[in-house]
Image (tube, grey):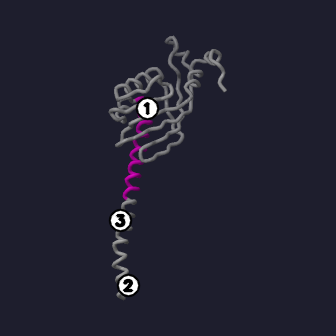
Amino acid sequence: MLIVRLKSIAATPLLRLAMGSIRGKTMQLRENENQVDLHRMVVNQWIEAFNGHNVPAIVSLYADNAELYDSGMKRPRRGRTEIEQWFTTRFRTLSSITYTPASQLFTEDRAAVTWTTRGYGPRLLGQGWLSRPFQVDGVSIFHLVNGRIQQQRGYYDHLSALEQILPPLKWLLPRRL
C-alpha cells in the first residue's frame, strides 16, 4: 500500500500537468473553431453583400487599413475609402455581376473561396444591346484579423473576361497557349 500511495502521490503532479495540457489544447481547439466559424460568417456576409451590390455592407467587413487586390486591378486598393470607391465603380459599370462560391476552405486566419462570377459587361457607347455576357472562374484569398478582412486577393483570368465582353479582342491580341 505504501508503494502505491507513493506512486499515486508522485503521479498526481504529472497527472495534473497532463490534464492541464489536455484542457489547454481543448480550449485552443475551441478558440480555433470559434475563429473559423467567425471567418466563415464574415466571408458569407461578404458574398451576400457582393451579390446584393451593398457597398456599405461590404466595406464594413474590412479593417480600417485593409488591402484589396484582384487581377483586374492596376494597383491594390488600401483603406476603406479606396475599397468603397472600387466597389461603387464595379457595381455601377457591371450592374448584373454576381459571385457564386464553389468551395470554401478556412483556417484560423485565412479563407480561400473558389467561385464563378458572371454578369453582363458595361454598356458600350451607352448602348445596352452592346452589353455582352461574361463568366469566369477564380479564387479569393481572405486574411482575417479580429473578425475583419485585413487583406483580400482575387485571382482569375481577366483577359478571358475582357474577350467575352469585347469579342474583337480575340483577333487583336496574340493567341494564348
Residue occupying the point 55% across, 25% down = 158
- Residue nearer the viewer, 76 or 171: 76
- Residue nearer the viewer, 71 or 18: 18
Dot 1 amino acid type: Phe
Residue occupying the point 37% across, 25% down = 82
User: Of the residues tagged 1 and 3, which is closer to the observer?
Assistant: 3
- Per the image, label 3 sits on a secondary structure element best described as helix
Q: Bounds of the magenta span?
A: 27-53
Quadrant where the C terminus is found in the figure:
top right
From the top left corner, tell me how far across and down residue 156 is, in percent.
Answer: 54, 30
Q: Are marks 1 and 3 in contact (CB under 8 Å)?
A: no
- Per the image, label 2 sits on a secondary structure element best described as helix
Question: Would you name the residue on which mark 2 appears?
Answer: 4
Q: Which mark is residue 50?
A: 1
- Per the image, label 1 sits on a secondary structure element best described as helix
- Residue nearer the viewer, 103 or 131: 103
Of the numbered discs 1 and 3, the one sitting upstream in the chain is 3
Instruction: Locate residue 15: give its quadrant.
Output: bottom left
Q: Answer left or right for 9 relative to 68.
A: left
Of the numbered discs 2 and 1, the one sitting upstream in the chain is 2
Q: Residue 68, relative to residue 6: is it above or below?
A: above
User: Of the residues tagged 3 and 2, which is closer to the observer?
Assistant: 2
Q: Residues within 10 Å of mark 2 (few under 14, many from 20)?
A: few
From the top left corner, tell me how far across and down residue 132 is, in percent.
Answer: 56, 20
- Residue nearer the viewer, 106 or 45: 106
